Image: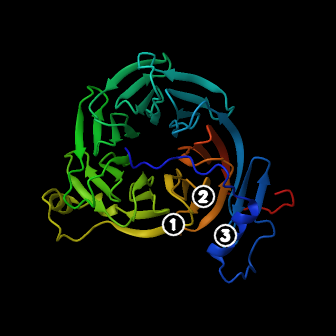
Amino acid sequence: MSSVPSSVPNPFAKFSVLTVFFFFQFQFDRDRDLPHAPPEPKKERPDWFAVFNPKVKRVLDVTLVHTLIHESVVCCVRFSADGKYLATGCNRTAQIYDTKTGQKRCVLIDESAGKAGDLYIRSVCFSPDGKYLATGAEDKQIRIWDIAKKRIRNVFDGHQQEIYSLDFSLDGRLIVSGSGDKTARIWDMVDGTSKVLTINDPDSLNNDAGVTSAAISPNGQLVAAGSLDTVVRIWDVATGALVERLRGHRDSVYSVAFTPDGKGLVSGSLDKTLKYWDVSGLLTGGSKRKDGVANGKKDLEKTSQCTMNFVGHTDYVLSVAVSHDGQWVVSGSKDRGVQFWEAHSANVQCMLQGHKNSVITVDLSPTGNVLATGSGDWQARICESFTNPVTYLASD
């Protein structure tokens, strides 16, 4: 995917607490009147810091728990369904860590893969029962690993370019993949067959519509995919029919995530913004819209709308995640920052800084308030967030 931007910004570019604090002042309080600002709007530690938005009530606290050192860029992070483990993908290996202790539990590497050059694992995803880990790589293959045996159970072939995204259905029966070959595929875990969802769209802004991110809805009925042509597309799983195009981003869409109730979809883009889309109309009574899009009609009323824009990052948004309770949206960016957003208002609660390179990937635990990040600085990090009211202490 030639238009994928480099994950390595200028190594001499630095953020300071003061710089980020003044950024918040400018973004959220242009008149510089801060009567409601908390006495301590920042939390600073030797290798990371958080700056809290002085214009909203601070209800969140964040602390770094583990720093996981890797031997290459960390392309992806993903929690297991029970939140006990974190998988990471980097050059040639997928690694699994205990989220409580930070200890590495196993390393998965395909020794049969060619040794020449790099082979980055671009996506990882646990099966819901935690027995298997799916990995998607630059060699166009999806490998299904038996974690206990550290062996490959299945290899799914079919994509013509690198695989950038994987997501299991909640029942574990299906896995969706997104690739630079302009397709998403829905794979049957039992027999390995796939249904191809092709971006062959006359309305596409250009010919470069590689799929950068794909997600399956909680009810298993919809697949959403973000692509380089700025559009988010949604398909019906049962029929493979295109049911919606979401337009509004001004640059490539790099990440998509459904809300836990399946009624919303969050997208992150190289235009430096996130968007929240109301897709509830696709859950019921969506057949008319489905038929219209599939037949190329453009005169039907659009059922899905962008209801919120999340503005605050200063560079590409590379990854987004939604908390298990739907209260928070988290994003990672080429600006090296991670932002916690209030999902109901699109207000920033806080910004984390600490990675020394782009934050390529973020994930939130399905069971608790735990955040994982992966970066071009060869590190993954695990943080805990607390949503009880915060007492501002001089030690913050």
Q: Which mark is residue 275?
A: none
Q: Earlier in the sequence, mark 2 or mark 3?
A: 3
Element under disc 2 = strand
Residue 297 x %, y %: 14, 65
Element under disc 1 = strand
Residue at the spot 62% in from the left edge and 55% down from the top edge = 337
- Evaluate if marks 2 and 1 touch, with contact meaning CB atoms under 8 Å apart: yes
Crowdedness of circle 3 by 10 Å Cα count: few (<14), some, many (20+)?
A: many
Element under disc 3 = helix
* Quadrant location of the N terminus in the rendered image: top left
Give the CA separation, mark 2 to mark 3.
12 Å
| Among the 4 quarters of the image, the one containing residue 352 | bottom right
Residue at the spot 24% in from the left edge and 45% down from the top edge = 197
Q: Earlier in the sequence, mark 2 or mark 1?
A: 1
Residue, disc 2 = 339
Extreme residue in the right direction: 394
Amino acid, disc 2: Gln
Residue, disc 3 = 24
Give the CA separation, mark 2 to mark 1.
10 Å
Image: 324 above or below 40:
above
Image: 257 above or below 347:
above
Residue, disc 1 = 310
* Quadrant location of the C terminus in the rendered image: bottom right
Q: Name the one closer to the observer, 264 or 338.
A: 338
